[in-house]
Image (cartoon, rainbow, N blue to C red):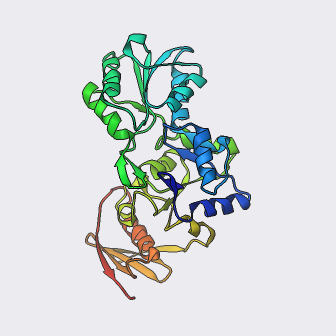
Amino acid sequence: MVYAGPNAIDGAPESLRRVREAGRAVMYVTNNASRPPSAVAEHISSLGAPTTVDSVVTSAQAAAALLADRLAPSTRVLVTGATALADEIRAVGLVPVRTQDEEPGAVVQGFDPHLGWADLAEAAFTLADESLLWCATNTDRTIPRERGIAPGNGTLVSAVAEATGRKPLVAGKPEAPIFTEAADRVGARRPVVVGDRLDTDILGAHNAGMESIEVLTGVDGPENVLAAAPEQRPTYLLGTLRELFGPYPRVDVDREEGRVSARCGAARAEVASGVVTVTAPREDLDGWRAACAAWWAENPHDAAAPTLDWQDRA
């Protein structure tokens, strides 16, 4: 939501500065377990959205906290991941190790672009002992990079899972603790999760009992939002973070003669026989908001991709 690779998402730093200038707290929750919070804060600040280490919550921190709650102090933990993850394990009183020969009592796995087959094999060998706890920082299937979408930590976790027949505990997004930790740090009474991924940010908001804003500058486009499972449906839908500062358009839903319709601004959407007919230009975000409202009202418990019929008035 803030950056892809080394570069800022267009409009994100300026918008986040405005949020802070308005007296609102901003916390950054990241599933990136390969960099320490200080590096994340420095990166965000360098892009023009000044922040501090305390404003960053990483999945490595969440994983370390989870393990500290379940393991005795000084337990050895096999780290399949970056130095930043090992540092967080050490910070909670556990002992990071890198080989099965060091007799670890648990395994923690996080993203590191330099991980290789030997690292994943070491985790698999260790996890042959089913009494050992296995924790993954996150299971993101993909990560955005400046050149496009790349395999994420979830692909590496899946490799170990396939080899061992085991399933890890997950510490970061979309699990609730990482979000509640961020909200608790600033004493938020009505936090809202702003993100660009349905399967981590928006699902995490649902899991934490928080409202959510999906911003269409990342992995998921409006078609994905429309077809999302109930637990991945955002409270609000924005094109960019710049839209945080305008009034959110009202969306009205009606049921008439067995049909569900919704109106957002001048846009209208109607559902009938699995088809959503949208009266608006296809690029009009209000049209997508109306389509989502109508389709979700018709399908409150099921994920499904409707057929879209756009009646473009432009």
Count the labels in the image.
0
Residue 198 percent location from the top left of the image: 42, 54
Q: In this view, does 151 lie above or below 79?
A: below
Q: In which quarter of the image is the C terminus?
A: bottom left
Residue 110, by quadrant, is: top left
Q: Which of 59 and 198 is in front in this view?
A: 59
Residue 209 higher or lower than 58, as above or below? below
Residue found 54% across the figure and 14% down from its top: 72
Q: Which residue lies furthest to the bottom in this view?
A: 314
Q: Give the residue drawn at x 49%, y 62%.
A: 215
Residue at 28% x, 25% y is 164
Please tell me in which quadrant of the rendered image residue 107 appears: top left
Pick the front one: 39 or 165: 39
Percent coordinates x, y for residue 78 in the rendering: 43, 21
Q: Position of residue 160 (x, y in %)?
A: 31, 29
Which image quadrant for residue 17? bottom right
Query: Where 16 sits versus 280, above or below?
Result: above
- The answer to whether 61 is drawn above or below residue 200 in the figure is above
Residue 154 locus on image (x, y percent): 36, 40
Is residue 289 visible to us here?
yes
Residue 191 in view here: no
Q: Report the side of 74 relative to 136 (left or right).
A: right
